[in-house]
Image: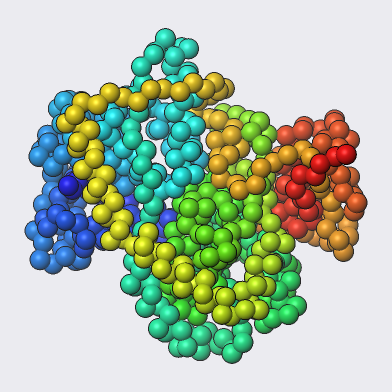
Amino acid sequence: MTAAIHFETEAYDVTHGKRMGRHFAGHGFLSAFARYSSESDPVGYVGNAKLGAGFCSFIKSFRPESSPRYIVAAKAGALRQVGCLFTPSPINAAQTWQREMHGPRSWSLCGVNHTLSSARAMDALTALLSAAVQPWDAIVCTSTASRAVIETLFPRQEDHLSRRLGASRFVRPQLPVIPLGVDCDAQARRSERKEEARSSLAIEPGDFVVLFLGRLSFHAKANPTPMYLALERLARRHRVVLFECGWTANDQIAQAFAEASAKLCPSVRSIVLDGRVDEVRARAWAAADVFCSLSDNIQETFGLTPIEAMAAGLSVVVTDLDGYKDAVRNGIDGFAIPTMAAPPGAGQHLAARHALEVDSYDSYIGQASTAVAVGVDATAAAFERLAADPDLCRRMGANGAARARERFDWKVIVRAYEDLWQELAALKNSGQAAPSPEAMRGFWPARPDPFELFASFPSLPFSTQHIVSQVAGIGETEVLERLSLRVSLVNAVPEVSSTSLLALWKLAGGQGKTIRDVLAAHRNASAALTVRALLWLAKLGLLTITLRQERP
């Protein structure tokens, strides 16, 4: 069973200046579909004949012997003969209404989620429940974490429609989990050029090379502070080289990364590479020993680079967050670093400000990221184990490569999609009833507290019985210097300042207090903001958080 592929050039283009993960995912999917689909003559669905020619050209570049064809939107009824329309984004209300003109069982709709934190994405998903979505439609979730987000949004909207309109029957699309894929053969070939790549980058024998590859954004991808601090500790015993292979949105962000690197890991040799250049990325993959990505952001739902690293035979050090939790097996393929986020209720103010357009989307996700703590000690320990034991590093890399081939290779992913499309066809033809709704109440269904909506992302539960204490050996001057770094994002949150964060750091003290005691001593401040600030200070390596301790 196959599907017509909704083709819009932008969704599959990896050559423009504002490339995101979804562009690489889209390009990877379509090129894999062209090569591995059971359909010898793929069908495109396009807005006009020019796009149709682009679709056919794309397919034939990967499968020269094929005879691709296309359906233009003005003749959408031809989708009946195909049976399913796949779009490289979540299905939307307009698509369901367009199908309704031809009959609800004319074809299935299948889309795939990427980021779920934007207002546009949340509005589009909740709008489906009052549109013409059917049980034979599907939104492919790239991770169990992203499915949990959608399963939080849908009941909120259903509850609103029930109370507002008396609605009692709701129809949801299927929410299967199918990860993004990787070309394992291509990635495996990277290691064949290891010596050449290391020589070209002046890597000396015995250097321990850590690679971060992807968009360099401390507010929307991964704050580098925990990685920098952990690598500086490692540099006391090993020669450490850090590749940051990526790109920034502007020179100010690039300068902020350079400033933070110089301050937080001065003993580490830092090499910044242009990740927009294919050959440069290939050298980075080949020369590295370990891949690291400490994602701390709600906009990330899967994370393509960790599985690319595994396919390249690298051991990985990543956060135990979002879709990374599905990809990396802790202690087998590498190390998954514990994360902790503020509890539900601590971010409603953030949600309201974003909903009212007081804060931009970038500001919203940046502020939310400050309340996701990443274990600096655990990161340092993971690096130390890998640097001290090259055999362990190689074994974990081999384990990851085998897992990537078994679960994430594009051949496997294309088969999973075709199996799904077959299941949707069976549902469409059987007339199966819609699933039963669940109940949930919310302030604004499509604008929930981010720490409620993304509660499935972190790996550690939050408790006010956790102990917070100052990191030993850090004085007030260092605290203020670290808070002054642009990557610390102090300026992103209107309600806080370096002074207020310093005061909270002092309140925690060297002996430590429970978060409950800190809140009691800080009762004149917002409890939600205080909790977020404590986690923030922990991520910056200024406080430690000890897990729950039982009181006598």
**In the depicted view, which residue is nearer to us: 18 or 196?**
196
Q: Is residue 552 left or right of residue 148?
A: right
> Looking at the picture, does residue 268 appear above or below residue 473?
below
**In the depicted view, which residue is nearer to us: 326 or 134?**
326
Tell me residue 320's x, y (percent).
58, 54
The residue furthest front is 552
Is residue 120 visible in the rendered structure shown here?
Answer: yes
> Looking at the picture, does residue 247 appear above or below residue 415?
below
Is residue 279 visible in the rendered structure shown here?
Answer: no
Residue drawn at x 47%, y 57% is 327
Q: Quadrant of residue 47?
A: top left
Tell me residue 151's x, y (percent).
46, 33
Tell me residue 338's x, y (percent).
64, 54
Residue drawn at x 64%, y 51% is 339
Q: Is residue 533 left or right of residue 351?
A: right
**In the depicted view, which residue is nearer to us: 83 or 52?**
83
Q: Is residue 58 left or right of residue 494?
A: left
Q: Is residue 296 left or right of residue 187?
A: right
Residue drawn at x 37%, y 60% is 408
Quarter of the image containing the C terminus? top right
Tell me residue 528's x, y (percent).
73, 34
Residue drawn at x 56%, y 60% is 330
